[in-house]
Amino acid sequence: MISFAELGVEKNILDAIEELGFVKPMPVQEEVIPQLIQKVSGDIVALAQTGTGKTAAFGLPIIQNTQTNKNHVQYLILSPTRELCVQIADDLISFSKYKKGVKVAAVFGGSSMERQIKMIKQGAQIISATPGRLLDLIKRKAVKLSKIDTVILDEADEMLNMGFRDELEAILQNTPEHKNTLLFSATMPKEVLAISKNYMHDPIEITIGKKNVGAENVKHEYYMVHAKDRYLALKRIADYYPEIYGIIFCRTRKETQEVADMLIKDGYNADSLHGDLSQAQRDNVMNKFRIKHLRLLVATDVAARGLDVDNLSHIINYNLPDELEIYTHRSGRTGRAGRTGTSIVIANMREKKKIKDIERLLNKNFELKEIPSGRAICEKQLYHLIDRMEKVVVDYSEIESFLPNIFKKLEWLDREELIKKFVSLEFNRFLAYYKNTKELNAPSDKQSRDRQSREKQPRLDSSEYSRFFINLGKRDNIKPVNIIGMVNDFTGIRDINIGEIEILNNFSFFETDRKYEDDVLKSFRNKERNGREINVEVSEKKKSSKRKKDKSKKKKQTGTNAAPPKKLLRKRRR
């Protein structure tokens, strides 16, 4: 087993990282640290998942190589979010605890620019920055990058996904041509490849694991439910894992806040993280989550980028992301630093193909799981309670004075009665809630059964249908099958007779059995598709085809393009 000392890390840095609990190098550190310390090569592209020790891989060498007698910027680290920027700066300060003279500045938006400029002017040799704020400082001529030795792009794919390409290029153009460039990324999409070709010279590529695959220690599971039961399924999953500590990913800010609010209302230690929060609110939520005062963090992908929390047990995909590569980033937030983790997808049948696509992307099989029954959840929670009770440490000095009165008060109870009352006191909430809960698992052959049932349904008379307007059309890639799927999933009623569907450019019309009119209207409230709020209203009945034909015929006969007489038509046929 190789050690950090054998990689070339000097004594004062070894002392600092030993205090931080570093024992042996991780694979990416074994590969990168010697290259940077010895300056064997120039540019490096390192492909490794989030949580594989990348910060130490580049952080330890640049601390060691920092020339403390020079007070200009020697190393620049760019990362996508404020949280990651600050985390990197904090880690570098910890690594350099026993190396005097190393100055690190964190440069990011949402904080005092004047204070950051002051830190740079005091001689910071290392800057950890987000692209937007750093470009502002460059334009103000508050920072000079002309003597940069090395530029490090951390989570490059995330920066490009967040739209920082123009800022990155503008920053790189302000750095000297003869410098080293290090690019760290979990995946290698074409945008990252373009950066490496345009701004790097014959880089060596270091790949930890396979390209574009998830962390090896992550188990992938999915649950099939009706869309309307998604939140109920989430609660059951959370209840089934009493020690859960994870992130729940939603697509939109609105949905993120709604799910978090419902969890809080239902008694879970949860909160939200999304772009509508102020920086102070974000900091407060993240601080509570890091110290586990929150067990569930409901977040959008953008808000969660750059979060550095190592010991997450679960990632829950409340919705699958639109881009499959994003799933790799989500799932990579668990199973870090040698631990194991679970990535869960709550899906409906229309998302089954997406799951297959992700399986191909990751070269991993997802396990289809059954939504836990109420009985299974109660059993799991009960044994968890007993385990906690067995392992609790009793501080006799604190409770000893209370014990005589407690023993006297409970002396009429025998051992079995005492245990039963203790369990019931703590456990009645679960027993009551799950006593008569319904089955949530969607049938695996749902689509074919839906199709067969619709084919068997008798065609209703036009007067028995309600006609609805929906604000989605061809430009939203809506097809009849999508509308049928939404009606079935949102209402949860499998045998609604669906009539005519008319797809137009910006909106559409569809018909359903009139007796389900209220169910359809209620089920579409507060629903979204691809981030767009859905609006469904009852529409006027479509005029009958016979009346339309008669009107059209009359118009043609009275207009300038009236149809020719029948005699003339017969003559032409001859």
Image: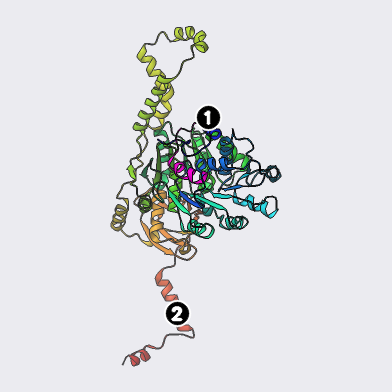
Please state the horizontal and vertical placement of residue 293, each as a whole percent of the image: 53, 31
Query: Which residue shows up at 39% across the image and 11% down it?
Result: 413
- Residue tagged 2: 554
Of residues 170 and 220, the one drawn nearer to the viewer in this rendering: 170
Of residues 511 and 64, the one drawn nearer to the viewer in this rendering: 64
Q: In the rendered structure, which segment of residues is drawn in magenta?
A: 18-37
Q: On the image, which quarter does residue 338 sit in?
A: top left
- Residue tagged 1: 19
Q: What colour scheme was applied to this rendering of the protein?
A: rainbow
Residue 28 inside the magenta-drawn segment: yes
User: In what element is the residue under mark 1?
Assistant: helix
Residue 525 visible? The answer is no
Tell me the amino acid under the disc marked 2. Lys
Please state the horizontal and vertical placement of residue 482, each as a whole percent of the image: 40, 57
Q: Nearer the viewer, mark 1 or mark 2?
A: 1
Does 274 sit above or below residue 292?
below
Indicate the quadrant containing the C terminus: top left, top right, bottom left or bottom right.
Answer: bottom left
